[in-house]
């Protein structure tokens, strides 16, 4: 099931996307999609609505250095033995088609294509890896946009990763998907920059959820970014960046100056 959050002439709603491309429609649901799905009976043509970020999380938990080839391209010797955690604020989240705005204080902003995990209604606190997947609501595409120069000069990552618009997610949440071996790609103006697979993750999705849950409670709708493969690089004003993941579609955002 593909869960969307969308704007329509009567306001904003969650819905279930059905069909393909131009023939797709969205069946509106009551309230939020966590728990039992109740349809309102209202249907919308995809062409008549605007997709928003599929969720507004309480927090975005991110994993650094979780692909060995990315660690190598950044000058590291080996991935960390335990997952490397950092946070993005919820105000960084934007949806498909929303602009990534380049901050005036940075001279190098990079794209980072990632698989995003959406935590479900049960949440997660101090759970084992064996229990972890039961807490997953679904998956979507994400771009861990990073001010690379600020990341290097600050010595910690909060400012570099936390600017408004630095966490595009979407276009929807897929609730039924095996993510063990999916292609993860990034294109900038049609040029392929990143091309990895989730099977290359150093720490699996289940391991990451369990590890994070020992530190903080993951609430329904929280987003977990799982790391980026090799090929990260700069984006500049006027370009368009797209993240594509098998089974999840494509998340596309224009890049604008501050």
Image: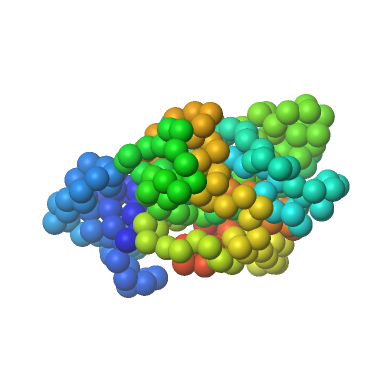
Of 132 and 36, the residue lying toward us? 132
Residue at the farthest left position: 41
Q: Residue at x 78, y 27 (%)?
A: 154
Number of marks drawn = 0
Of 194 and 104, the residue lying toward us? 194
Of 203 and 256, the residue lying toward us? 203
Q: Percent x, y for residue 257? A: 67, 41
- The C terminus, quarter of image: top right
Q: Residue at x 82, y 52 (%)?
A: 72
Q: Residue at x 66, y 29 (%)?
A: 158
Q: Percent x, y for residue 168? A: 54, 46
Q: Is residue 253 above or below residue 90?
A: below
Q: Residue at x 39, y 45 (%)?
A: 135
Q: Is residue 19 above or below residue 200?
A: below
Q: Is residue 124 left or right of residue 216?
A: left
Q: Looking at the image, can residue 253 be seen?
A: no
Q: Is residue 252 above or below residue 168?
A: below
Q: Is residue 43 left or right of residue 112?
A: left
Of 39 and 86, the residue lying toward us? 86
Residue 57 image-quadrant placement: top left
Tell me which colouring the rendered structure shows.
rainbow
Q: Percent x, y for residue 203? A: 62, 50
- The N terminus, quarter of image: bottom left
Q: Percent x, y for residue 3? A: 34, 54
Q: Looking at the image, can residue 133 be seen?
A: yes
């Amino acid at each position: 099931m593909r869960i969307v959050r969308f704007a329509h002439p009567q306001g904003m709603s969650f819905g279930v996307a059905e069909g393909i491309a131009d023939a797709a429609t969205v069946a509106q649901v009551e309230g939020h999609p966590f728990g039992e799905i109740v349809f309102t009976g209202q249907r919308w043509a995809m062409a008549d609505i605007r997709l928003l970020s599929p969720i507004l999380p309480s927090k975005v938990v991110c994993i650094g250095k979780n692909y060995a080839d990315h660690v190598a391209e950044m000058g590291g010797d080996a991935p960390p033995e335990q997952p490397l955690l950092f946070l993005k604020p919820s105000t960084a989240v934007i949806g498909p088609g929303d602009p990534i705005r380049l901050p005036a204080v940075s001279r190098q902003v990079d794209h980072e294509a990632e698989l995003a995990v959406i935590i479900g209604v049960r949440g997660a606190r101090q759970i084992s890896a064996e229990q972890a997947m039961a807490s997953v609501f679904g998956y979507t595409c994400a771009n861990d946009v990073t001010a690379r120069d600020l990341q290097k000069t600050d010595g910690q990552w909060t400012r570099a990763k936390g600017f408004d618009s630095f966490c595009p997610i979407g276009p929807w949440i897929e609730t039924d998907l095996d993510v063990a071996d999916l292609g993860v790609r990034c294109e900038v103006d049609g040029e392929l920059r990143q091309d990895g697979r989730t099977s290359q993750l150093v720490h699996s999705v289940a391991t990451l959820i369990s590890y994070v849950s020992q530190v903080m409670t993951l609430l329904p709708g929280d987003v977990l970014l799982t790391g980026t493969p090799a090929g990260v690089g700069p984006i500049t004003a006027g370009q368009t960046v797209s993240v594509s993941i098998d089974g999840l579609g494509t998340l596309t955002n224009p890049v604008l100056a501050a």
